[in-house]
Image (tube, rainbow, N blue to C red):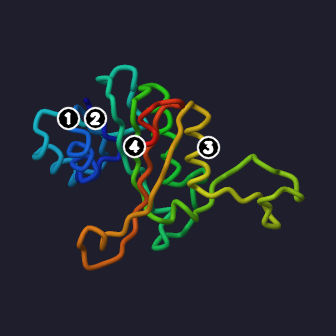
Amino acid sequence: MKIGSLFSGYGGLDLAVQEVFGAQVVWHCEWEDAPSAVLDAHWPGVPNYRDVTKVDFTQVERVDILTGGFPCQDLSVAGKRKGLTDGTRSNLWFQFHRAIVELQPKFVVIENVRGLLSGKAASELELESSGVGFDGTQPVLRAMGAVAGSLAEIGYDCKWVTVRASDAGAPHRRERVFVLATPNGSSSAGR
C-alpha cells in the first residue's frame, strides 16, 4: 500500500501509519524547511510537494492512504482559539479535504490537537436564533463536527479517538485526536 502525506511535519505520523499498515510513503507535502530536511533524510528520493495549496493532486502518484496533521494553531488551547474559520491556518483542513476528493484513498488518517473537539468552526447551519447550536451571536459548530461533516459530504465515514502521550510512556499528557476515515460502506471502517 502507498501513503501520501500532507502537513507531514517531521514524519512521526507517517512512521506510525507505515508500521500499522505495512505501507510505504511515496510523497510528502511539508511547507517548512527544517522538517523537510528531516523528511529528506528519512525518506531519500521521496518527493516533497511543499505548498499544499499549489499541488494538483490529479498529477501526483495515487495512494491508498492519505495522512496528515493539518495546522493546529487556531484549535490549540495554547493558541488564540480562532477555530476552523476563514483566514486561519487551521482552515487549511479544506486543502486536505480537496486532496481526499481528488485522490479517493481507501484510508485517511488525521492527527490533531484535542482542541479539534472543542474549537469552533464556521457554519451555515441553523442560521436562525432558534437553532439548536445558537450561542446568541452565531450558530455553534465544533471543528471536529466540521471535519466529520465535510468527510460525510464526500462519502467518507470516520471514527476518532483521543490518545495521551503518557499512554505511550511519555512523562506528560499532551492529548492528540486521531481520526480514521474510510469510504462509506467500506468493510475496513470497523478496524
Q: Which residue lies under the disc numbered 3?
A: 149
Secondary-structure class at tag 3: helix
Return the mark for residue 104. Answer: none
Give the mark, 2 or 3, whose residue is nearer the N terminus: 2
Q: Residue at x 25, y 79 (%)?
A: 171
Q: How many angstroms separate mark 2 from mark 4 (CA)? A: 18 Å
Instruction: Give the residue pinned by disc 4.
Output: 191
Three-letter amino acid code at the position of disc 2: Ile
10 Å neighbourhood of mark 1: few (<14), some, or many (≥20)? Answer: some
Asked whether the residues under the numbered discs 2 and 1 touch, taking CB atoms below 8 Å apart as contact, a structural biologist would say yes
Q: Position of residue 7 (x, y in %)?
A: 35, 47
Q: Secondary structure at mark 4?
A: loop
Q: Nearer the viewer, residue 184 or 80?
A: 184
Q: Label 1 belongs to which residue?
A: 24
Residue 94 location, x and y as percent?
Answer: 52, 41
Q: Earlier in the sequence, mark 2 or mark 4?
A: 2
Q: Amino acid at mark 4?
A: Arg
Q: Position of residue 36 (x, y in %)?
A: 21, 47
Query: Of all residues shown, which one is farthest toward the top?
Result: 59
Circle 2 residue = 3
Q: Which residue is rendered at x = 75% and y = 46% of the image?
A: 124
Q: Is tag 3's residue or tag 1's residue first in the polypeptide sequence?
A: 1
Residue 126 shown left or right of residue 98 in the figure? right
Label 3 packing within 10 angstroms: few (<14), some (14-19), many (20+): some
Residue 133 on image: x %, y %? 77, 59
Q: Nearer the viewer, residue 191 or 103?
A: 191
Question: Vertical placement of 163 versus 23: above or below?
Answer: below
Going from N to C along the chain, the mark reached first, 2 or 1, is 2
Q: Nearer the viewer, mark 4 or mark 3?
A: 4
Q: CA distance from mark 2 to mark 1?
A: 6 Å
